């Protein structure tokens, strides 16, 4: 089967062009990011230790400033940037309006699996707007599509805590921390989890163990 699309037809208002999702790519992650004004973030600061992904970026139009482990450099149209160290912190901002960067990544020697950030990117604005039922529906639907579920569970816990659903929130927080213990530190300071912090089961949830309380 052949699919033909144009970047602009896939571009969302926030500048994300979700190529992998739109075309159903299964072999590797591929997206593009566009900015309407100089200084706008194109690639959020992140690293890939959890995935072991190699990532390749190509500037399709305009100019971008990349940062890799604190080193900054400009990249114009046609420039390719390969980052093969998963632990390297990387990101990029636009230097010109209309800058577009293509990104592709996968783990060497391993089957590709999509990551739940694709859903969480849509969930965060809903949480900010207080649209908790919609956020919960998105997250619940996503559980069957992504093999990596820890952040989905974590955001479900945040959503349910805001909705007053303590039991579900604590259950999902426990599962999230059990899968990714580093989320305990994030949970400790997350304001959306404040409604359940006084629950006697909170310490067990933060330790990733089911409560006997």
Image: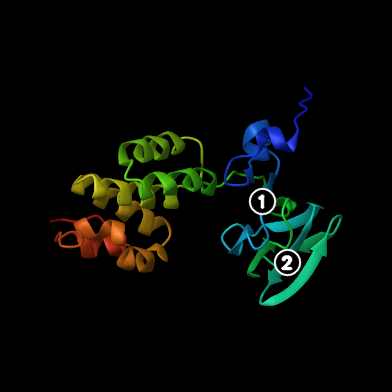
Residue that extends furthest to the right in the rendered view of this protein: 78
The residue identified by callout 1 is 36
Residue drawn where x is 68% and y is 49% of the image: 34
Residue that extends furthest to the bottom in the rendered view of this protein: 70
Residue 95, above or below 3: below
Identify the mark nearer the N-term, 1 or 2. 1
Side of 185 relative to 160 (left or right): right
Secondary-structure class at tag 1? loop
- The part of the image, by quadrant, that contains residue 80 is bottom right
Number of numbered markers: 2
Secondary-structure class at tag 2? strand
Q: Nearer the viewer, residue 58 or 176?
A: 58
User: How far from the left and from the top, in percent, is residue 46?
Assistant: 59, 63
User: How far from the left and from the top, in percent, is residue 157?
Assistant: 31, 50
Compute the Cα span from label 1 to label 2.
15 Å
Which mark is on residue 65?
2
Camera-side mark, 1 or 2: 1
Query: Does residue 24 appear in this view?
Result: no
């Amino acid at each position: 089967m052949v699919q033909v699309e144009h970047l602009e037809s896939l571009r969302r208002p926030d500048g994300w062009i979700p190529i992998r999702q739109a075309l159903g790519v299964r072999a590797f992650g591929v997206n593009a990011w566009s900015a309407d004004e100089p200084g706008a973030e194109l690639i959020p600061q992140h690293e890939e230790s959890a995935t072991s992904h190699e990532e390749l970026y190509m500037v399709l139009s305009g100019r971008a400033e990349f940062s890799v482990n604190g080193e900054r450099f400009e990249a114009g149209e046609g420039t390719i940037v390969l980052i093969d160290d998963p632990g390297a912190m990387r990101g990029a901002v636009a230097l010109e309006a209309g800058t577009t960067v293509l990104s592709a990544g996968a783990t060497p020697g391993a089957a590709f699996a999509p990551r739940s950030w694709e859903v969480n990117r849509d969930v965060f604005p809903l949480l900010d707007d207080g649209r908790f039922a919609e956020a919960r529906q998105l997250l619940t639907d996503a559980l069957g599509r992504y093999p990596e579920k820890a952040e989905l569970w974590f955001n479900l816990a945040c959503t349910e805590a805001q909705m007053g659903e303590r039991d579900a929130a604590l259950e999902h927080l426990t599962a999230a921390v059990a899968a990714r213990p580093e989320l305990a530190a994030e949970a400790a300071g997350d304001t959306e989890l404040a409604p359940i912090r006084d629950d006697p089961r909170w310490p067990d949830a933060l330790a990733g163990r089911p409560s006997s309380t």
